[in-house]
Amino acid sequence: MDNFVQIFTAGNSGIITWLFMFAVAFAGGVVASVSPCSLAMLPLMIGYVGGCSKETPYRTFVQLCCFILGTAIVFTVIGVICAVTGSVFASVFGGYFTLIMASILLIIGLKIIGILDFEIPVIIKSMPQNNTSSLFVYPLLLGVAFALAGTPCSTPILAGIMVFAAMGKNLLAAVIMLFLFAVGQGLILIVAGMFTSGLKNIKKFACYTDGLMKISGVLLILVSLYLFYKVFSPLI
C-alpha cells in the first residue's frame, strides 16, 4: 500500500515520470518482440504453443494468453526481487549502488548498439517438448520456460528495465514495469497467432526495429552518463 501511495503522491512531475517509465517498459517489450531475431522465432512459437492449423482460433487465443501469463509471472517475480534488492543495496552502499547500476546500464547500452559483444547466460537452454494438448497448464509452463530462457534480442532490453526497477526501489512500480514488459512482448505473439496474414506485415517492420534497438541502446548510454554525472558532480 505504501508503494501505491508513493506513486500517486509524488506530485504531477513524479506521476508523469512513473507513467513514462511504465510506457517505456511496455514499449521495450514490444520492441524486443519485433526485433529481427525474435521475429525469426515467432512462427515456431505460435505453432509450438498452439497455433497449428488444427487448433481453433479460440483455443489458439486462450493458449497464447496463458503463455503470456506464464512470462508475466516470471517477470513479476523478477520485479519484486529487483525492488527488494535495490532497496537493500541502496541503503547499504549508498552512492556506490548508483555507480554499479550506471555501469550495468552502460554495458547493456554498448551491447545493444554493437560495440560490446558477449553472451548473456540463460537458465534454460532449450524449450520443453510439446507432448500434451493442455489448454491452460502447458502453455503457462511454456511461458515460464520462455521467460527464463530469454532471447538474445530481448534480454538486453529486459536487463535495462530490471536496472531501472532496482533503482526505483518501489515494489509496486517494479512489478508493474516488468508485467508491462511481458504484456508488450506477448502482444505481437497474439496478433500474429490470431491473424497469420498479419505476420508478413510484422516481418516487414523488422527492418525498422534494428534501428529502434540501436536508439534504445543510445538512450541507456545517455542515462548511465547522467547517473555518473549526478554522482560525481558534487566533487567537481
Image (cartoon, rainbow, N blue to C red):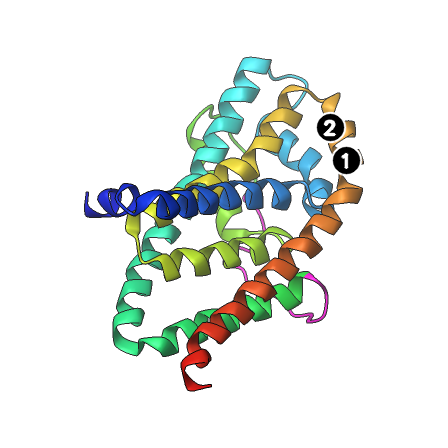
Residue located farthest toward the left when viewing the structure as drawn: 1
The residue beneath circle 2 is: 199
Near-viewer residue (153 or 17): 17
Is residue 194 in view from this perspective?
yes
**Mark number for residue 33?**
none
Kindly identify the amino acid type of the residue bearing the numbered disc 1. Lys
120 within the magenta span? yes
Circle 2 Cα neighbour tier, 10 Å, few/some/many (<14 / 14–19 / ≥20): some
Is residue 93 shown left or right of residue 124? left
Q: Is residue 35 left or right of residue 144?
A: right
Name the quadrant containing residue 125.
bottom right
| Quarter location, residue 114 | bottom right
Label 1–label 2 contact, CB within 8 A: yes
Secondary structure mostly seen in the magenta stretch? loop
> Does residue 196 show up magenta in the picture?
no
Region of the chain picked out in magenta, as a range: 113-128
